[in-house]
Image (cartoon, rainbow, N blue to C red):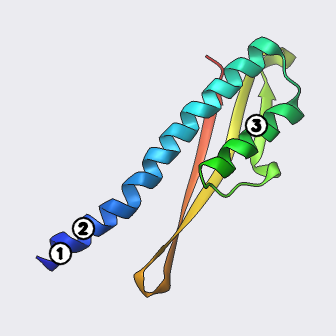
Amino acid sequence: MALWTCLGYLSYRIVPVYLEKNAFSDGLVKIASRASIEKWPDSRIVSLVLAMAKEKDFEIREEDVQVKHVRGGPEVILIVNYQRTEIFPSDYQHVFQFKTIAPAE
């Protein structure tokens, strides 16, 4: 019984992190797509990524966001490294680290 309780608790804490990661990745693709169509400057793209990361409670720095232009043109690919730290009982901290490569659709 204790094992099921432990697994249930871990699922309760870990699954939402991965759901938020998927939503964040989808948002990055949307930003890359709009940036490619509307030819946004890199500074605007980075600020939108940082704002979305803050909204989703991911830890990110400006240097963790790379904006790549395909063949120097307007098409954008975002490469983003980000993380989230979760604190578990007994003050155990686990850092979930993610990397998303988001091309424009």
Residue to which mark 2 is pinned: 7
Looking at the image, which residue is at 43% across and 45% down?
19
Query: Of the residues under marks 3 and 2, which one precedes in the sequence?
Result: 2
Q: Hey, which quadrant is residue 100 in on the image?
A: top right
| Residue pointed to by mark 3 | 48
Left or right: where 14 falls relative to 8 = right
As measured in the structure, the alpha-carbon distance from the residue carrying label 1 to the one carrying label 3 is: 42 Å
Label 3: which secondary element: helix
Secondary structure beneath dot 1 equals: helix
At 76% from the left edge and 17% from the top edge, which residue is drawn?
36
Residue kind at label 3, given as amino acid type: Leu
Q: Which mark identifies residue 3? A: 1
On the image, the x and y values in percent for residue 103 come to 64, 25
Disc 2 marks a residue whose amino acid type is Leu
For marks 1 and 3, the one nearer the N-term is 1
Other residues around mark 1 within 10 Å, as few (<14) / some (14–19) / many (≥20): few
In this orientation, which residue lies closer to the viewer: 79 or 40? 40
Give percent across and percent down for residue 64. Answer: 75, 50
